[in-house]
Image (cartoon, rainbow, N blue to C red):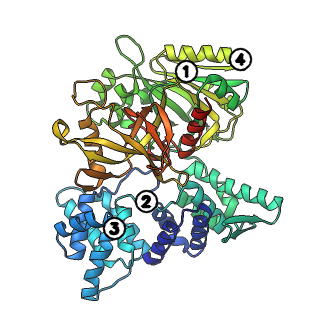
Amino acid sequence: MHYSDLVTVYEALEATSKRLEKTHVLSEFLQTVPENELEKVILLLRGRAFPPWDKRTLGFSSKLAVKAVAVASGESEKTVTESWKKEGDLGKVAVLLVGKKKQATLVSQDLTVREVFETLQKLPGMEGLGSTDRKTKTIAALLGHATGNGAMFLLRTVLETLRVGVADGTLRDAITWAYLQPQINYNMEKNDIEFADDSSREDYNKLTEAVQKAYDRCNDFSHVAVTAKEGGTAALGKIALELGTPIRVMLAQREATVEAGMARVGAPAALEYKYDGFRMQVHKDGSKVTIFTRRLENVTMQFPDVVDAVKAHVTAKTCLLDCEAVGYDAATGKYTAFQQISQRIRRKYDIDKLKKKLPIELNVFDILYLEGEELLDMPFSERRKKLEKTVKNVPKAIVCSSYIVTDSVAEGEKFYKAALAAGNEGVMCKALDGLYKPGSRVGHMVKVKPVLDTMDLVVVAAEWGEGKRSGWLTSFTVACKGDEGDFLTIGKVGTGLKELEQEDGVTFNQVTELLKPHLLSEDGRDVVVKPQIVFELAFEEIQASPSYESGYALRFPRVLRVRDDRDPEEITTLEEVRVAYEHQRGR
């Protein structure tokens, strides 16, 4: 398959914001993709060379991209950079400059999808002396052979900033339309789905659910698409969890009070402490224990103490546990804030020294797999019973989360106050019959925290500081997650960060160093940033605002911390902003 065929689809997806139209474009295209190309195409549609659980990155910076465009076009890096500032999009610059060279040399050779995909997969393995030069020449060669807007989309893929609006739900539905033959008709004029009757609507929902369940278990749409094309729903039903391959964690919605939380999930409700730690997904397969963060990063090496605790105090031979790792002071035994222990996630040296300095207790709150049996579709109350039989509580090592079941709001309030007094963030309210939905922000699990509002938002732009803050990025544009999986700006923040390293909290210098590898472009003091670094922000109020893409702005925001454990895909959604705004107006 020619890469230009994929580029045509990119262009069509970029040209519309309508979710159903995107689904139609994708489904029509997927039906034309040969089976041996399908896995590659699905990943490239998401701007990836590897599945989400494979944390290899292409490692291609904007600086290298400028060099690659210069090599491919025969222009100087200075010319490329100046054109970039003028156009505002390095991909468009590549199309203009590389295209000009082609016209002069009359050389044209269309790339294939296989060639692009296999080349991208080789990039992470290019290491050592001369690797930068090899990477640059490799991508320059691809750019030189790309036709039409191919160079633009290729460069966006290499920089991991493709974003043509292919959200999870859109791709799920496109796979359903393309391969499972639902009895529906897409009305392009009305941009709506037409069903023959209620029965066809129910059948369609079952088909999309089959695709969703398969994805929930393997976390790889490329595998799901190939399976659906080859064997339909019967084959999809055979896709199962695999120990050692992480799944996306289930996410909670938010309520302002315990009463509202219990009302949302239903009474009686389960209440648990909401710990101020970081999420851990622990896979035990015999003597092998593997640990993943909520970002699906393998951090087993960084937490030998957790491995030892699981081996010693988890009775099951095989299981998958959903947990929160909470730090505590070795001298006093008191729990410490997330920021104190977050450095353990990144540390790869002096592990033994750090685990003594920053010990953690693993609080286990769910079990998703046990002795060969998947538990995702089992009610939470039943999963909890199995969990309590599987984990031996050893305080300051591994314990089941603090937990009550009640239909009394007064008892729930008492439990909430006890959670806060113990140094926790609040409580979780869970429906006893709730199923586990990987990656979903479900209504049958809600978090209740103190009234100070916070949001997790991703940095998409910044400004270089002046005067005593020269050399630091100091003003940060942040974004929430839009309805189509895109990032929509919601405000700027510059307060909450510290200037001096010895002060408590995150410093401007630390944030600058975190953002530097993700800079996409600079224009004077203004910087565009690849959406990778997540801030937790406090704010006073949400205001309607036409100044930002979300339609909202945060009043008096300040940075509370950097969420090292939070993936950009898991940040606060536009829907959550809307709900919070309406709730605020109704107070």
Residue found at the very far bottom of the displayed protein? 106
Q: Which residue is mark 2?
A: 48
Does residue 291 show up? no
Q: Earlier in the sequence, mark 4 or mark 1?
A: 1
Question: Where on the picture, by quarter, is residue 319?
Answer: top right
Q: Residue at x 49, y 30 (%)?
A: 453
Residue corresponding to mark 4:
408
Q: Are marks 1 and 3 in contact (CB under 8 Å)?
A: no
Report the residue marked by disc 1: 392
Instruction: Tell me if label 4 and label 3 are in contact, CB under 8 Å.
Output: no
Say what amino acid the circle numbered 3 marks: Gly
Measured Cα–Cα span from mark 4 to mark 1: 29 Å
Residue type at mark 1? Answer: Lys
Q: Earlier in the sequence, mark 4 or mark 3?
A: 3
> Which residue appears at 45% of the width and 44% of the height?
296
Q: In x, y percent, where is residue 53?
A: 46, 49
Q: Earlier in the sequence, mark 1 or mark 3?
A: 3
With respect to residue 134, does 502 lie above or below? above
Residue neighbourhood size for the residue with mark 4, other residues' Cα within 10 Å, grouped as few (<14), some (14–19), many (≥20): some
Identify the amino acid type marked 4: Ser
